[in-house]
Image (cartoon, rainbow, N blue to C red):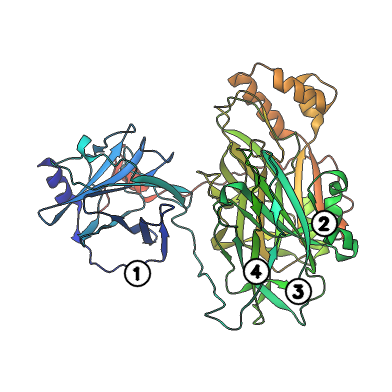
Amino acid sequence: MHYLLLISCFVTSIIGDALEPTNSVFLDRQKTVSFRWSYTDETITYEITVPGTGWVGIGFSPSGTMKGADIIFAWMVNEEPRVLDMHSEINGIPALDVEQDIRSFNMKQNGTHTTLLMDRFLDTCDEAHDFVITEDTTRVIFAYGRDAPKGNLPNFGSYHGRNRGVRSLRLLDKKLPVLNVEDDTSLKYFDVRIKPFTIPRRDTYYHCTYHKLPEFEKKYHMIQFKVMITPGREKYIHHLVVYHCKESLVTDQMLNSTEECYVNDQGDHWKYCTAVVVAWAVGMTELTLPDHVGFPVGSPGTPKIVKLEMHYDNVDLDEGVVDTTAVRILYTPNLREFDAGVLLTGHDVTPTLLVPPGSNDFVVHGHCTDQCLRGIMKHGNQTHVNVFGVFMHSHTAGHKMIVRHYRNGTELEPIAKDLAYDFDFQESKILPTEKTVRSGDNLIMECVYDTTKRTSITTGGLGTRDEMCFGFLMYYPKMDDAYCQATPDGRDLEKFFGKNNIGDVYYAAMTKKWTDYSRRKFNEVQLASPLLELCLINDGSIEGLKEPYDVPKIQHRYAESIGRCELEKRRRGTNRGWRPS
């Protein structure tokens, strides 16, 4: 009965039936497996409910599979719960942890369902087998079986069959309540909806339409955005962006047309529609703004015409698929304290975003330089802004994303980061603590790519297998919404390959026999190359910028704070793990 002794050493109490969750989702598409959780600075309490009265498993996985996962396995024995802290080194039966890091638990069955309630530290200090829960994306895996194990441990008779799954969540994100017009009669809404559109039989297609907003008799604040995907069309929609357009440049012909983006005169996109109103990507739910900010509408300079850009992903080349997706925007006459805006930073969509095949952690920087940011803030009559939310976006090769922040050569705490980025779960992040960005600061959108399973180069582009590197920063007080982006000057890339133009660079990169050394040296050249900037506001480009512009020189790097487990280990002067009580 070794496992029972282990549990009795570490479980402090049986927690009661009641749980007041701050978050609740279904882990499966059929909405049969519910997951609820709440957290403090040091602990997390979570509850899973599954069909049946056999066994239940819930875990946290770095990859979304059982391999490398931290797993809790539980079932009832003579009406008493048996709960085990386990781990899996393969996609198979998990193994028992030496340390049972379960602070408290409860389990109940009602004849049709099983519910397991758990409490643990975010960091249990079990470095070998337990998952550290952070603000990064967490892959939550689950499984359940109809029949309880016959012995003391899970066995082959405990196979889950199809009763398993995974869902990516950010467990420690700040969540805001979803608003509803039925609950608050002062709220109003309008939809930006495309006319019925047949998705082309193409792997990637960008569809652009222009829309007039309602005529507002006074100023309102837009406070919630919800994408209403046509049922059954979820797999086709990769992302969408709503842009604020200059109404004087949008013709009646454009308003009545639907066309492919970024072809023909759509190359003049920047001339017509510069500012981002809202962006959405696969995996996102509603975006609700904090109660002190709102995006203004109905006052001078606010959107009257918007452009809706839809990125369709039809990888199976299905035909006859009609879409009528809409963005529902809730607005209120009860104005918040501050008008909010969006600043877009990152790497422009160009081939200079070039990642060799076989790269593990290839770093790309999209700069928002001090000179561009200074120009934007001067034009907006601001000395600083407060960033309250961030949406970070890359494609399938992206696996880490960080919005870095620098002031006078010193790196500050990142504005936002996700070191376990999941392409299928791209959600806006409301920051737990707002970050102040001052005129003359530098921002870097850092995207880290994994192309170890690719045999050809990956470049910046519109397709899903191409790459992007964007950060949408939501801030207040509002300035003219702007693009603050930069890309490497191609001359250093040309020199690396011994070529005279960027087109030849692309061909040379395609045919090169890449090694770990050449990948590393090329990445160093990319990161150090002088910058060409895209520094735009609604009225046009910021004038007088030096170009090309040197990358910022950083004298002091930001040092992450040391966690309590590492601190206690150092205090004790030992490399052995410390167990929290």
Mark before the other along the chain sequence, 4 or 2: 2
| Residue 175 picture location, percent across and down | 49, 64
| Residue 469 picture location, percent across and down | 66, 43
Say what amino acid the circle numbered 2 marks.
Answer: Ser
- Report the Cα–Cα distance between label 3 and label 2: 19 Å
Mark before the other along the chain sequence, 2 or 1: 1
> Which mark is in front, 1 or 3?
3
Residue closest to the eye, 295 or 575: 295
Q: Identify the disc placed on residue 257.
A: 2
Say what amino acid the circle numbered 4 marks.
Answer: Ile
Q: Identify the disc placed on residue 214.
A: 3
Could you tell me which secondary element the residue under label 2 belongs to?
loop
Mark before the other along the chain sequence, 3 or 2: 3
- Report the Cα–Cα distance between label 4 and label 1: 29 Å
Would you name the residue on which mark 1 appears?
20
> Which mark is in front, 4 or 1?
4
> Which mark is in front, 2 or 1?
2
Furthest residue in direction front, as rendered: 320
Could you tell me which secondary element the residue under label 3 belongs to?
loop
Mark before the other along the chain sequence, 1 or 3: 1
